[in-house]
Image (cartoon, rainbow, N blue to C red):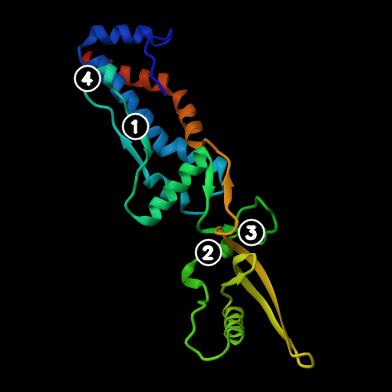
Amino acid sequence: MKLDVNTDSAIQLTAKLERLHRSSFPSAVRNTLNDAAFDMKKKEIASSFRLNFKPKTGTIPYVKKLILVEKANGFNVNKMSSLVGFLNPSNSSDKRFVEGLYKQENGGIIDDGLRYLKRARGGKHNGRVQRENFYDKTRVVSGRSQRKGTRKSKFLARAYRAMKEGKPMFMNTMKGNFLVKVNTVSSDILSRKISFDFSFIAMSRKVKKTNLKPTHFVEEAGQKTSKKLENFYQKNAEFQFKKHLK
């Protein structure tokens, strides 16, 4: 976005500021640019994020924490700029989240992590993921086992444990690796067959990648903030008038 101080509504303010004091005009411009940057950080990016996604509790404060503002400075209005955007974090989970946001903004392919399925979204393809279905690696019944037995017996033991504890488990199939909930495990004495009732919650993206369409949610936030620039400029001009005309 760009601050234009030569519009019909701003040109008189600009002229008055230039006559007021040599620092008044650049100070008003600098503070206006910084107001716009912080408006995006604190309000508009979060607002656009809510409209484009279905964030769970705690996501919005996390998003705001990852937004960096580089303030405008100095007195040369031709070189002034304020920057706002997502930082490049050193933490691996933060970095992965920001990379995901970049793909959400511009479009891209996600080929790692988990993709939630219809069952996790309350039976709706585009529904909000239900709280109890969010992936938590600390609650997943591990596939590692020191017990003796065949692969089939170990799988059965893990399924029984997952059902009993009400925790999900991973199940590797020909179609991919799935996160499932075990609803029931039943056996037929005569046929000696064991039946499982699973709810498929999510699947690994290693087999089926997710193609993201661009949302331009940050660009939308910038467009909303740009509509406020003249009001910010008016406010900062009035501050300069009060400061120098006491």
Residue at 43% across / 10% down in the picture?
9
**Which mark sits nearer the N-terminus, 1 or 2?**
1
* Circle 3 residues within 10 Å: few <14, some 14–19, many ≥20: many
Q: Position of residue 171 (x, y in %)?
A: 59, 72
**Residue tagged 4:** 75
What kind of residue is marked 2? Answer: Tyr
Distance from Cα at disc 4 to Cα at disc 2: 50 Å
Distance from Cα at disc 3 to Cα at disc 2: 12 Å
Decide which of 87, 58 is in the foreground and name it.
87
CB under 8 Å between callouts 3 and 1?
A: no
CB under 8 Å between callouts 4 and 2?
A: no
State the SS at label 2: loop
**Mark 4 or 2, which is nearer the eye?**
2
Q: Quadrant of residue 69?
A: top left
Distance from Cα at disc 3 to Cα at disc 1: 38 Å
What kind of residue is marked 3? Answer: Leu
Q: Position of residue 41 (x, y in %)?
A: 39, 38
Quadrant holding the N terminus: top left
Quadrant holding the C terminus: top left
CB under 8 Å between callouts 1 and 2?
A: no
What kind of residue is marked 1? Answer: Leu
**Which mark sits nearer the N-terminus, 4 or 2?**
4
Q: Which mark is residue 83?
A: 1
**Which mark sits nearer the N-terminus, 1 or 4?**
4
**Which mark sits nearer the N-terminus, 3 or 1?**
1
**Residue tagged 2:** 135
Distance from Cα at disc 1 to Cα at disc 4: 17 Å
Task: Report the side of 179 relative to 195 (left or right).
Answer: left
Q: Position of residue 91 (x, y in %)?
A: 34, 55
Distance from Cα at disc 3 to Cα at disc 4: 54 Å
* Circle 1 residues within 10 Å: few <14, some 14–19, many ≥20: some
Distance from Cα at disc 1 to Cα at disc 2: 35 Å
